[in-house]
Amino acid sequence: MKKCSNHRCHWAAPPLGVSLIEVLIALLVLGIGLLAFALLQTMNLRFTKSAQQRTIASNLAYELLDIMRSQRSTVGYYGAITYGSFDGVDGTDCNHSENATPVANMARWRCEVVSALPDGRAQVNLATNGEVTVTIRWGDQHWETDVNKQSTTFNLTSVL
């Protein structure tokens, strides 16, 4: 490269290392962008799984309310569904029974909750005015360090 000043011309040395620094900065920016994209994908998977579990909980709660509506005379039996009543339910044999008694329906429904949701539990509260509240709780937020924040709850209240 020729450089002239005060009527004197001489050859200037080309700038060494400038393009290497530019390439390194571009690689750094690209690396940060790729890490951000990977984090975005990870969060997307986590939130998609969480949304799927909320949908399953909603469907299970509506299913139980529909069962209760179809057998209004036996609604009182469903108050036996408590968080503690899920102890010993393994979620492996959720077959539909031809015997549609409240006990058989509750056993099948408990099995479905346990098999569909991680650490799934539920509770049914029956009010005297015919109002029923189905509460489903499951372990969803395993990234939380506080044990009290690791479970998600879905509540559905309806009048039969």
Image (cartoon, rainbow, N blue to C red):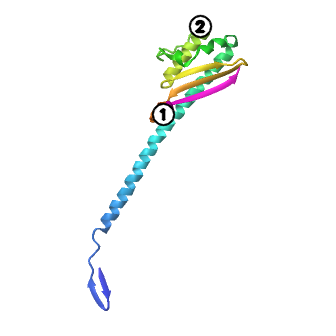
Q: Amino acid at mark 2?
A: Asn
Residue at 33 percent of width and 62 percent of height = 23
Identify the residue position indicated by label 2 in the image. Answer: 99
* Quadrant in which the N terminus is drawn: bottom left
SS for dot 1: loop
- Residue 145 occupies quadrant: top left
**In magenta segment, residue 158:** yes
Farthest right residue in view? 129
**Span colored in magenta:** 148-160
Q: Amino acid at mark 1?
A: Gln
- Residue 15 in the image: x percent, y percent? 29, 73
- Residue 71 in the image: x percent, y percent? 67, 13
Residue 35's label in the rendered image is none
How much space separates mark 1 and mark 2, taking CA atoms? 37 Å
Q: Is residue 10 left or right of residue 94?
A: left
Q: Nearer the viewer, mark 1 or mark 2?
A: 1
Type of secondary structure dominating the magenta stretch:
strand
- Residue 151 in the image: x percent, y percent? 51, 29
Residue at 59 percent of width and 26 percent of height = 59
Q: Earlier in the sequence, mark 1 or mark 2?
A: 2
Front position in the image: 144 or 101: 144
All told, the count of numbered labels is: 2
Identify the residue position indicated by label 1 in the image. Answer: 141
Farthest bottom residue in view? 7
**In magenta segment, residue 156:** yes
* Quadrant in which the C terminus is drawn: top right
